[in-house]
Image (spheres, rainbow, N blue to C red):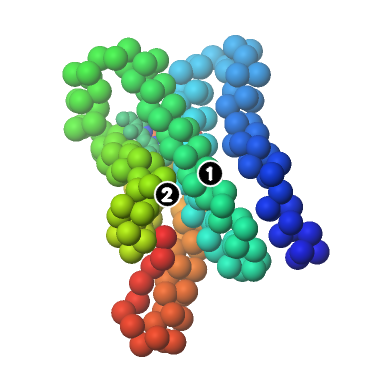
Amino acid sequence: MKAAVKSALKNKAAKPVVWLVCLTPLTYLVAIGPDGWGANPVEMFNRFLGDWGLRGILLTLCITPLAKITGQPGILRFRRLIGLFAFAYVCLHLSSYVVFDQFFDVAAIWKDIVKRNFITVGMISFVLLVPLAVTSTQGFKRRLGARGWQRLHRLIYVIAMGAVLHNIMMVKANYTEATIHAVILAALLGWRISQSAHRMSISGKQPEISA
Ligand code: HEM
């Protein structure tokens, strides 16, 4: 079974399959059309894309634990792709806010960023996410060195915390989904910290969280 999974992960078709899976939410959004978008399509678009941006970030964070727990390092080769899809969904989320919600009104957008705390937190998370997307290539990994690259990419935890906080802060009534996101992030952080503590107990070094 383990060998079958290992060879499936190495298969040439695996990446296109991951592409298709990552494109499914966007395809769904287009496929349901105006009838499915409901009475407030702008809000529907914005929230749908924000949700998938956050889910993508959490999924990206799941890859390393999943690879270690299952003993399938082959999963790691999909991390960058999933991370870039998460970034794309966040970009679409921000675009839907700028285009359909604010009609490119830069002054109104700035006022929102300064005055509405959940938008401030969302914007900080987005700004931090940009350098991670830009430096996700092998070329940048070489230029920054493995340690420098890993250090920079640890920002993903701060981004994920900001994104979950942004989600919690904008909720007015039903906290179920925001709570699920927060619990998943807490579990992922807990796992990373326990791994780091374990490594420290073996090597006697300072605790560290790997990206
Ligand atoms: C890493 C960056 C971001 C992530 C992961 C993210 C994610 C989310 C999530 C999960 C929601 C809640 C969706 C729901 O309730 O179903 C949301 C709502 C929202 N976000 Fe973001 N967001 C990010 C950045 C931003 C930025 C930069 C802006 C604007 C400057 C923004 C504006 C909004 C708005 C306007 C809402 C909806 C509020 C409402 O409908 O009441 N977000 N976002």
Name the quarter showing ligand 1: top left
**Looking at the image, which residue is at 47% across and 33% down?**
89
Asked where in the image residue 126 lies, by quadrant, the reply is top left
> Which label was assigned to residue 138?
2
Q: Is residue 204 left or right of residue 179?
A: left
17 or 173: which is nearer to us?
17
> Which label was assigned to residue 82?
1
In the rendered image, the quadrant that contains the N terminus is bottom right
Residue 110: % across, % down: 20, 25
128 or 13: which is nearer to us?
13
Mark earlier in primary sequence (2, 1) = 1
Q: Amino acid at mark 2?
A: Gln
Residue 59: % across, % down: 54, 49
Residue 128 visible at all: yes
**Looking at the image, which residue is at 52% across and 43% down?**
81
Residue 55 visible at all: no
In the rendered image, the quadrant that contains the C terminus is bottom left
**Looking at the image, which residue is at 79% across and 59% down?**
4
Q: Label 2, secondary structure: give it.
A: helix
